[in-house]
Image (cartoon, rainbow, N blue to C red):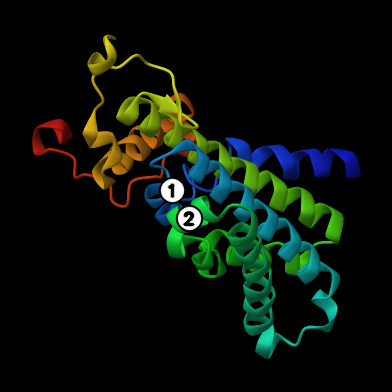
Amino acid sequence: MAAGRLWSALTRPLIDQNPITLQILGICSALAVTTSLDTAVTMAASLTVVLVLSTVIVSLIRRHIPDSIRLIVQIVIVASLVIVIDQFLQAFFFDISQRLSVFVGLITTNCLVLGRTESFARSNPPLVSAADALGNGLGYSLVLILIGALRELFGTGKLFGAQVLPLVEQGGWFTPLSLMLLAPSAFFLLGGLVWAVRSIWPDQAEAPDTTPPIPEEARR
């Protein structure tokens, strides 16, 4: 039973409860840092590390956090981890850190991180919380990496900076689509991904807010 619960907590956020395609959480970074695959992977890894560590810490001390200051404590924990991650990136991956700009620091206020610490880690033991956090981090990473790969590939013909599609100016056949490197492309790709997921799994679509009125002719 315990193994089944861990497996469910780990795998459900990948597709069934994906934090981006289903819950629409953390989309700011999904739109902002996916112009290249390396920045998308770095952002995904950073958020996943912060998410797992923060939920484990909150779960370990959950019985000792007064309700009146629980959000403050959680934000302090997350912010401390984000500072460590940011300093690590600046020390070892300075170029990527510069391209990520403020978005690593904004992990502190990412609704996915705060949501899992508040709604799950506060009421579950550390191991289950870690599995849930890792699953959500991987689900988030899956979307970021997919969008980042598509934008870099069709925007520059490269992946991880290596030329994949031969450019026309180099005697090849591919002409880069400059739109893919602009912000609107991220909206289009993310919207298309959400539409595709909810078309394949209709149970993920929200119920309509209102029921359309029945035409008078249909009542007769």
Q: Residues within 10 Å of mark 1 (few under 14, many from 20)?
A: many
Left or right for 135, reference 42? right
Whether residue 183 appears in this view of the structure is yes
In the foreground, 133 or 198? 133
Left or right for 180, reference 92? left
Q: Which amino acid is tagged 2? A: Gly
Q: In this figure, which residue is indicated by the disc labeled 1?
A: 30
In the foreground, 169 or 111? 169
* Residue at 24% from the left image edge and 14% from the top image edge: 168
Left or right for 209, reference 8? left
* Residue at 51% from the left image edge and 50% from the top image edge: 96
User: In the image, residue 82 lies at what x, y percent?
Assistant: 62, 67
Relative to residue 182, is residue 129 depicted above or below?
below
Element assignment for label 2: loop
- Contact between marks 2 and 1 (CB within 8 A): the answer is yes
* Residue at 49% from the left image edge and 35% from the top image edge: 203
**Disc 2 and disc 1: Cα gap in Å?**
7 Å
Q: Quadrant of the N terminus?
A: top right
Left or right for 154, reference 131? left
Q: Quadrant of residue 76?
A: bottom right
Q: Residues within 10 Å of mark 2 (few under 14, many from 20)?
A: some
User: In the image, residue 217 lies at what x, y percent?
Assistant: 9, 32
Q: Quadrant of residue 119?
A: bottom right
Q: Which amino acid is tagged 1? A: Ala
Q: Nearer the viewer, mark 2 or mark 1?
A: 1
Relative to residue 159, is residue 2 depicted above or below?
below
In the foreground, 133 or 77? 77
Q: In this figure, which residue is indicated by the disc labeled 2?
A: 26
Whether residue 17 appears in this view of the structure is no
User: In the image, residue 107 lies at what x, y percent?
Assistant: 54, 64
User: In the image, residue 177 lies at what x, y percent?
Assistant: 24, 28
